[in-house]
Image (cartoon, rainbow, N blue to C red):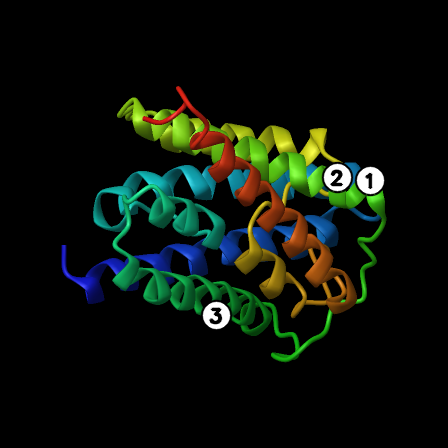
């Protein structure tokens, strides 16, 4: 598959993911009349449904990583050529931001925003570490088996993770950065972005190291 095609798929897929995440957050919060549980339910279901469709359609094109830590893991495993890694990362971050901005335009909000929602503290960071570790382990294991049900696995894991983790399962540096640019239901204040991404990258490091322990490769 040509590089422009695969990188374009990563941009489009990540943009659509953030459109679903952010848009459903805005709509859910608007219609929930202050009921945070209802807003989170709408947000999580819409995100999981969109994720399943995106992964199913774009997986054959680019692998549908939609996530820098997944692409980095694929590069470490030799699945993604190192020459394409930078293109994937730029497409994911750019697509994520584009998806957030599209939502702002769609709902008549200011294009440029800065999130104010606090997501800080040890429990939140531990949650992000575990969420990312789980996601990477799932992707790596299912991919090694050639399991065609990866879209369902990932979508359902994210759906459950919204409710089962303190951080609501970001597990994605591109998503984290983009959500700092929206002062809506799904936002994260910029001051908390670096620590969230650090927890996600730590999970990547642990995954890669464990995969290279004797008897664990393949």
83 displayed left or right of 107? left
Vertical comparison of 102 with 77: above or below: below
Instruction: Decide if residue 134 is in sight here.
Output: yes
Q: Residue 193, position in %: x, y? A: 70, 61
Instruction: Decide if residue 35 is in sight here.
Output: no
Q: Foreground residue, 137 or 63?
A: 137
Tell me the number on the disc at residue 98. 3
92 displayed left or right of 9? right
Q: Nearer the viewer, mark 3 or mark 2?
A: 2
Quadrant of the frame with the N terminus? bottom left
Instruction: Count neighbours of disc 2 (C-alpha within 10 A) and say few if under 14, some if 14 to 19, many if 20 or more.
Output: some
Q: Earlier in the sequence, mark 3 or mark 1?
A: 3
Residue drawn at (57%, 56%) of the image = 173
Q: Residue 208, position in %: x, y? A: 47, 39
Q: Secondary structure at mark 1?
A: helix
Is label 2 in contact with label 1 (beta carbons under 8 Å)?
yes
- What is the CA distance from the residue labelled 2 to the residue labelled 1? 5 Å
Q: Earlier in the sequence, mark 3 or mark 2?
A: 3
Residue 132 placement: quadrant: top right
Is label 3 in contact with label 2 (beta carbons under 8 Å)?
no
Residue drawn at (59%, 65%) of the image = 178
The residue singled out by tag 2 in the image is: 126
Tell me the number on the disc at residue 65. none
Q: Foreground residue, 167 or 101?
A: 167
Q: Residue 3, position in %: x, y? A: 20, 63
Residue drawn at (39%, 50%) of the image = 71
Determine the residue located farthest toward the left in the rendered image.
Answer: 1
Q: Residue 119, position in %: x, y? A: 80, 53
The residue singled out by tag 1 in the image is: 123
């Amino acid at each position: 598959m040509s590089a422009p095609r695969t990188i374009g798929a990563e941009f489009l897929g990540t943009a659509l993911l953030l459109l679903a995440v952010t848009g459903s957050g805005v709509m859910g919060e608007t219609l929930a009349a202050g009921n945070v549980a209802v807003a989170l339910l709408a947000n999580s279901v819409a995100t999981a449904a969109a994720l399943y469709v995106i992964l199913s359609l774009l997986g054959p094109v680019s692998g549908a990583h939609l996530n820098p830590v997944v692409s980095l893991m694929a590069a470490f495993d030799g699945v993604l050529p190192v020459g394409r890694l930078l293109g994937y990362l730029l497409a994911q971050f750019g697509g994520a931001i584009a998806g957030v901005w599209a939502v702002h335009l769609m709902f008549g909000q200011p294009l440029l925003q800065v999130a104010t929602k606090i997501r800080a503290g040890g429990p939140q960071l531990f949650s992000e570490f575990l969420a990312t570790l789980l996601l990477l382990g799932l992707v790596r294991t299912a991919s090694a088996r050639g399991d065609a049900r990866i879209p369902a696995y990932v979508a359902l894991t994210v759906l459950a993770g919204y409710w089962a983790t303190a951080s609501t399962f970001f597990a994605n540096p591109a998503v984290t950065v983009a959500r700092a640019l929206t002062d809506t239901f799904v936002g994260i204040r910029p001051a908390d972005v670096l620590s969230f991404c650090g927890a996600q990258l730590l999970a990547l490091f642990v995954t890669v190291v464990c995969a290279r322990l004797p008897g664990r490769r393949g």
